[in-house]
Amino acid sequence: MPSGAFDLSGKVAVITGGNGGIGLGMARGLADAGAAIVIVARNEAKSLAAVTDIEQRGVQAISLTVDVTEKAAVAEMVERALRALGRIDILVNNAGINIRKPPQALDVEEWDRVIRTNLTSAFLCSQAVYPVMKAKGGGKIINIGSMLSIFGAGFAPAYAASKGGIVQFTRSCAVAWAADNIQVNAVLPGWIDTDLTRRAREEIEGLHDRVLARTPAARWGATADFAGIAVFLASGASDFVTGAAIAVDGGFSIMG
Ligand code: NDP
């Protein structure tokens, strides 16, 4: 492996849902490796705070207020990122929501909202950056799955469908775009302490302890646990890795 294989100086990374949680954890890792950062999310105040956080790491950062479920907004997002920073080398499809209900209670509008936010957005953003990456001779796309890419969950049918779909979408893009030197991989987080799971822990009694008992690492994940995998999958160190789905879960998915 050449020295400096993890160096991202001169690269630009777009992170959907990068204003908090796992997305911000990845953005910080990519910034520390030298990449300029584009934070894409809806909550402008939260995004501006994330930009300040990233700038303190000594790289350029901007935020774009975008609903990633809207095709026109995604196209405009790519144009604005290019105008501001000149290139896009790395895309992290991380924006996600969950609506916790069993299948028999979920409205089709709720189903659509989850699928559009977690899966269709990854399609729209990947499709929009593809010509930009191809023209520059390559790129890196990182899609965020879940333990529910692997397991079923009675309380999250749309979420699990979207996250299972993310893995197959990842593999399809990896095959389609390998000849363009674009590597496409998925990261499957275990149970991570973020706004998303803080609410789940309040609503689901005993969840906190059940996760601890089943996780060999004996702790919940932290957003900082995603810095390393982001840098690896965004850098030259992973040039022969594509179509993979890598669990970052403290061993949750291999616990017998
Ligand atoms: P957060 O709720 O902290 O982050 C979700 C992010 O998605 C926010 O930044 C939010 O920003 C953004 N977002 C949601 N909808 C949209 C939209 N329509 N357009 C643009 N941005 C949007 O959760 P996490 O950090 O926990 O989750 C990040 C990813 O990791 C998700 O895909 C989630 O499914 C996945 N994941 C999380 C796990 C965990 O244990 N925490 C486990 C497995 C997977 P804003 O509201 O400002 O738009």
Image (cartoon, rainbow, N blue to C red):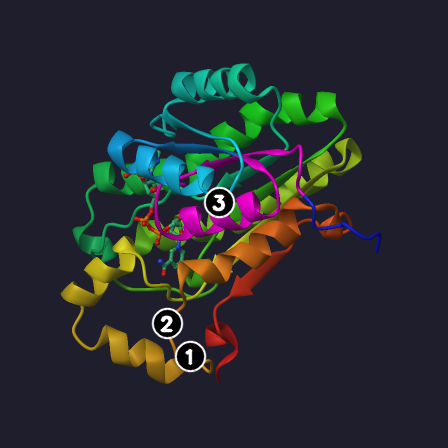
| Residue holding disc 3 | 27
Residue 76, above or below 179: above
Viewer-nearest residue: 31 or 208: 31
Q: Residue 38: x percent and y percent?
A: 48, 31
Residue 210, above or below 84: below
Residue 6, above or below 148: above
Query: In percent of the image, x 39 and y 35: which residue is there?
Result: 51
Relative horizontal placement of residue 153, taking residue 199 as reference (left or right): right
Sequence-wise, the earlier of marks 2 and 3 is 3
Sequence-wise, the earlier of marks 3 and 1 is 3
Q: Residue 165: x percent and y percent?
A: 48, 47
Viewer-nearest residue: 226 or 199: 226
Residue 76: say if magenta.
no
Query: In percent of the image, x 35 and y 84: which residue is there?
Result: 213
**Which image quarter is the N terminus in?**
bottom right
**Could you tell me which secondary element the residue under label 2 belongs to?**
loop
| Numbered range of the magenta stretch | 8-36
Sequence-wise, the earlier of marks 2 and 1 is 1
Q: Residue 111: x percent and y percent?
A: 28, 42
| Residue holding disc 1 | 215
Q: Residues within 10 Å of mark 3 (few under 14, many from 20)?
A: many
